[in-house]
Image (cartoon, helix red, strand yellow):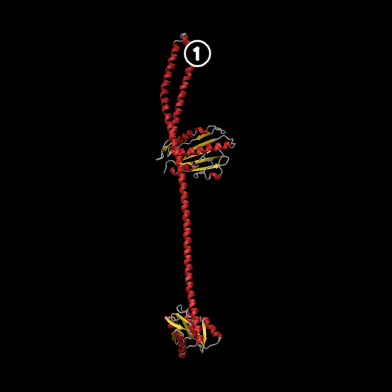
Amino acid sequence: MANRSGDGGEDMNEERTVILIVDDNPTNLNVLSDVLDEAGFEVRVAQNGKIALERAAYDPPDLILLDVMMPGLNGFETCERLKADPQTAEIPVIFMTALSETVDKVRGLALGAVDYVTKPFQQEEVIARVRTHLQISRLNKSLAQQNLQLKAEIQARMKAEAELKELADNLEKLVEKRTKELKDALHNLEQTQLQLIQQEKMASLGQLVAGVAHEINNPVNFIATNLEPAKEYVAELTRLLRLFMTHYPDPVVEVAEVLQFIDLDFIITDLHKIMESFQVGANMLTNISRSLRTFSRSDSTTPVPANIHDGIDSTLLVLGHRFKPRNKRPEIKVVKKYGDLPLVKCYLGQLNQVFINILANAVDAFDEYFQNGGDRSPQIVICTRAEGDKVCIHIRDNGPGMPDQVRERIFEPAFTTKPVGKGTGLGLSISRKIIEEQHQGQITCTSVEGEGTEFTITIPLSIP
């Protein structure tokens, strides 16, 4: 560090400033060197433009005093080359000239010079101009540095803001995703719980039906087992009575009075009819017991070959009481149009659950229809047919039907149009899961408001 003082006694504690003087006149070089050296500047000299360019590129000065009129490269050409080189372009250049034409000054300023000093020199003017432009240069450099720092800070802030925004966006998306996952998990949990309740209800119903079937089966077997010998005994007794009447046409008075009072021929004829009625009743009870066992069969682990018609019939038997007249509704007529179906390898117990859901919904729709003044005869038609390697089951009613906005949502979990406490909205959702996931089939619904609804179930003969 060098201590230098300028005119007026001003002290400046700063790094020694380098001034490059370019002039082909040795006298000018000496005079200016002495003046600037006394002012506290470090002075370097060059006697032509070429040397000036080399020295400025090798060790750039803080300011250049450049003579305009020089042999070889004149001042204008030297200045132009200095400004064309990025290494020296920012060095302030002050032209020294005896030229006073404005056009020359304009040319120099246009090439990048910052000022002019006119020969012969005024020492105080030269020092003042040098110091002014050095200060301006320092301020420009400081400003440029501050601009660079500001740009860097702005870029850093913009980057930080972009990263923060990206983080906020990602966080928002993550929150939305997590919220959706939690909602879905809660919804699935609720559906699973409701499905478990529904399945438990069906399992309980199956166990109840199975228990009833078992309890019925014992007395039915007892009756069926004893009916045949009873019929034989009645036949033998009848034959004996007729032989007695043939060989003893004139019985004693007491026997004759009893025979006249009881009408033996009528009793014998009616007794045979009673025995036949017992047989019909026993057969009906046997069929009911078989249907109940079919409905309650537990085959959830593996599919087994089954008769679809048996499953439908057992479901109709279980729901039979609901088809009877109720309040304003007359009896619901069930029409069965069964086709010739082979055995289907399926989960018949689960299919029975589908049948009972569809049929129970039809009954509910009829109940509401007649509560609202319906007057047509209620009817449910069940059709079955085989189509190649598939079986189709159609369940159609002539109830009130559904608007499209309801029909489009009936398979959604927890969707129901029934009042609170009347339904969970899971019956048809579970039915679709049973048909589509368990049996690799399809269930569809068509409905015309005011005319009725039809469900079509299609399942393969054997689950893939």
The outermost residue toward the left is 302
Q: How crowded is mark 1: few (under 14 residues within 10 Å), some or many (20 or more)?
A: few
Relative to residue 64, is residue 371 depicted above or below? above
Relative to residue 408, is residue 94 depicted above or below? below
The amino acid marked with disc number 1 is Phe
Query: Residue 402 at what x, y percent from top left?
Result: 55, 42
Relative depth, front residue between 20 and 70: 20
Query: Residue 214 at what x, y percent from top left?
Result: 42, 31
Q: Look at the numbered disc 1 and give the secondary structure of its residue.
A: helix
Question: Is any atom of residue 385 visible in this view?
Answer: no
Query: Residue 219 at what x, y percent from top left?
Result: 42, 26
Relative depth, front residue between 312 and 151: 151
The residue under label 1 is 261
Relative to residue 199, is residue 221 depicted above or below? above
Question: Is any atom of residue 206 visible in this view?
Answer: yes
Q: Say which residue appears at 47% left-offset and 19% top-offset.
A: 271
Q: How many marks?
A: 1
Which quadrant is home to the N terminus? bottom left
Relative depth, front residue between 349 and 101: 101
Q: Say which residue appears at 52% left-offset and 83% top-offset.
A: 115
Q: In which quarter of the image is residue 244?
A: top left
The outermost residue toward the bottom is 27
